[in-house]
Amino acid sequence: MGLTKQYLRYVSSAVFGVIGSQKANIAYVTLRGGERGRYVAVAACEHVFIWDVRKGEKVLILQGQKHEVTFLCPSPDGIHIAVGYEDGAVRIFSLMNGESNVSFNGHKSAVSVIHYDRLGARLVTGSKDTEVIVWDIINECGLYRLRGHKDIITQALFLKDKNLLVTSSKDSFVKWWDLDTQHCFKTMVGHRSEVWSMVLLNQEYRLLTGSADSELRAWDISYLQEVRKNTAGHFVLNTGQPFLLPRILSCKKAGTILREARDRVVSMTTDHKARVIACHGNDSILELFTVLSEEEVQRKMTKKLKKAKKKAAKWVECLSCVGGELKVALLLQNNTVETYSLKTSDKTPTANKTARLTLGGHRTDVRTLAFSSDNLAVLSASGDTVKVWNRSTLQVIRTMACDYALCSLFVPGDRQIILGTKSGKLQIFELASGSLLETVDAHDGALWSLCLAPDQRGIVTGSADKTVKFWEFELIKDQGTAQKRLTVKHTRTLQLEEDVLCVKFSPDHRLLAVSLLDCTVKIFYTDTLKFFLSLYGHKLPVLCLDISHDNTIIATGSADRNLKIWGLDFGDCHRSMFAHDDSVMFLQFVPKTHLFFTAGKDKKIKQWDADKFEHIQTLEGHHREVWCLAISPNGDHLVSASHDKSLRLWERTREPIILEEEREMEREAEFEESMAKGDVPVVPGETQGEAAPASKKTVETVKAAERIMEALELYKEENRKLEVHKYACENAGKELPPPKPNPILVAFGNVSPSRYVLDVIKKVRSSELEVSLLVLPFPYVPELLKLFNSYIQQGLEVELVCRCLFFLLKIHFGQISSNQMLLSVIDELRTNTVSKVREIRDVMGFNNAGLQFLQREIESKEDVMFFADATGQLKDKKKKRRKRERAILTIA
């Protein structure tokens, strides 16, 4: 069936205008061995931006996929950064090239905290799903899931020298976990409300917690002597004294620190030496505390170093540098990053602002957008500034201060712009100089809408003062420079009975459409201002409307979440469609077509066909309400603005859209989302206690299991072919031509069927391997065990095969042990696995010993070289000294 009408797909091109999203924290990072404290990582919707605070430039973008970033944590070696997302996924990026090769999926909801251990080999993540997961980064797999908290996890910290973990939550509890046995051995209940953050101090002998009040609580940690079992099976200390319970440590409240702020702690952090604590709440105060040693405590009491007043700091990061310098990076709620520096060794430390990143975005939400006539410039205006961007480079060309802007447009010629403001004023700016030419008191209420006349000689404005006013462009002489400048002259006024929300000219300049607060749209003749039509049917006010290029159709979007398509001949409603899950905020036709876009508070942008009344595609990417959008005059680009502070550029591709395939893709996406929110698979033999498997069932794990099953089916089919061929040769009494191999095996380089199965298993992500095997039905397991035996005998991927083998034996132990046919296979596996693993361990031990020997040899040679160089340098110095002495004697 041929295509009756071709639609072209719009895809996301770029994200700009956002400096840092407030949903995630800020972190200092090091790039390619650069200067410490120079680069900061911040979340930018689904991406991570690395900023050079000294130059104010974006130097690296870590590309996300779909979901918003919720937490950042650099690795101890500074080479990687772990990024947590709103869907519960964790990805580890390399800061050398910006690529991500490791990803973990275990949480059902947003990741709330991430931390590395001291060596950077393990990662702990906490989530809004109240669970804590410990991941093995080297093996790229989950170790275990820890359950016990009843609310969002707010902090999780490894102890450096002990295999312990401490976690805090909004359920007001702090829990201590023994990672050897994966159980909670102590719960601290001394908080009256949520525990929002905590830090370990004094070489992990003190815990400082921040709660919902103005106090920071300090707890002394005492590590008890090791507990062991005696011959009678009772717990005793190393001294031999009886002990009733196997305790590891005790916590005793040491006191409290009263903060300057009176609200809850938002975040609390320390530098890497745990010498300075930074703490802030929801107000504009950041408090820095110094941690003194016991000797310093004897000399003076602990006191505050600095209270730096900011504009509502959201996240803070500290970094200690040489010379006692402390660098502080702040991510503010108004889309700004600020860095400060202070000397902790000074008697009265003062904070000096070192950098401020503001140019690349607006401080408040962008409420209006416009394209220039040449498609090259984009105008965005917010509550305090208007910016003009280069569409191709996404760089800011001009930034000008303005009032709270609600609507905007480029004046024909693209040399001036006009803004309509919340105070009812019209502001005219000149782009060449970036100056405000004139402010016109146009209306007594908010100026909600602005439209350029089709003849390009004037504009029309609609306001909350119940009037529509017509204006003409004029050039007048500037009194100061005697040069002509642009202004607007009021010509006519249309008085209405309700507030005006939107106005629009028809392209032929014959009609004027006015949206009113009474949920109707009134159509007037432009020349006489006589009433022509009334479009009624919406249950809530019409917030946006547009007229097609041929003056035949008008489309309206309302706060009732519906859009209606009307004919302009008789005012009949052609179709009413449910458009968004929340208010429709903006609507605009693609130039010279009957296709149009709508933006809604449901975070989505949708494209529609006004002739066939069909939904074409949905553009997803924004993470908050979409306020407005603008389409370029040639229709190739679309820019949108959202409450998430981001501007997104979309571009039209040459890829056609097949509506049936688009609907099928939407159904698949819904299925994947429902699967991601499903229950964690139950492992046979596992009790649902404090510890559980780390991974979760996802679409990827199901697909991996299907690929393994398909490979096993192919292996069985090839074996069946060989058996049939062998039987045919025996009957014929001669060698027959071998059967043709499967095309899949040929495509993979004529590999054997057994090797193909191993290759499929190797391609499964390490973090998803266990869950993929868990999904695998048991009838495939016996054949897999036989293959594992052959792999181990040949020495192929012994570590991977053993991991799969042990997991399958664990989850299918009952069925395997009761199957007599598998008895010989298991016995061979036992013998071969033990011998092969012992052989590999011997090789690794030999190699390790050889490397250590080479290291000692190299170090000893370097020492000899070092002393030889030192001896030579000493002789040279003596010669130079003798020459100087001779010269002095000669002069004397």
Image: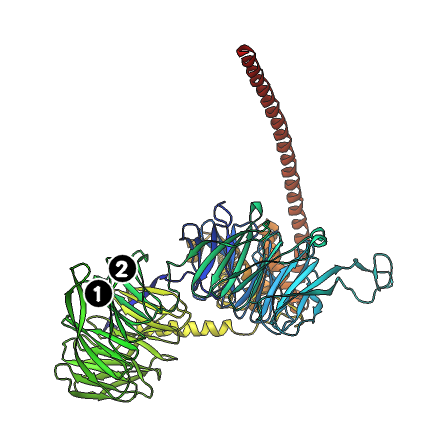
Q: Secondary structure at mark 2?
A: loop
According to the image, label 1 marks what residue?
Answer: 634
Q: Characterize the local packing of mark 2: few (<14), some (14-19) or many (20 or more) Cα atoms within 10 angstroms.
A: some
Percent of width and height locating residue 459: 19, 73
Instruction: Pick the residue in front: 784 or 432.
Output: 432
Who comes first in sequence, dot 2 or dot 1?
A: 2
**Residue at screen point 20% across, 79% down:** 469
Percent of width and height locating residue 230: 85, 60
Q: Secondary structure at mark 1?
A: loop
Q: Say above or below: 484 vs 496.
A: above
Which quadrant holds residue 692?
Answer: bottom right
Judge whether residue 585 can be spotted in this image. yes
Instruction: Pick the residue in front: 797 or 401.
Output: 401
Left or right of 539? Residue 870 is: right
Residue, far front? 480
According to the image, label 2 marks what residue?
Answer: 434
Q: Name the residue type under label 1.
A: Asn
Q: Say above or below: 727 vs 795.
A: below
Percent of width and height locating residue 487: 19, 68
Q: Characterize the local packing of mark 1: few (<14), some (14-19) or many (20 or more) Cα atoms within 10 angstroms.
A: few
Q: Name the residue type under label 2.
A: Gly
Residue, far left? 527
Percent of width and height locating residue 788: 59, 57
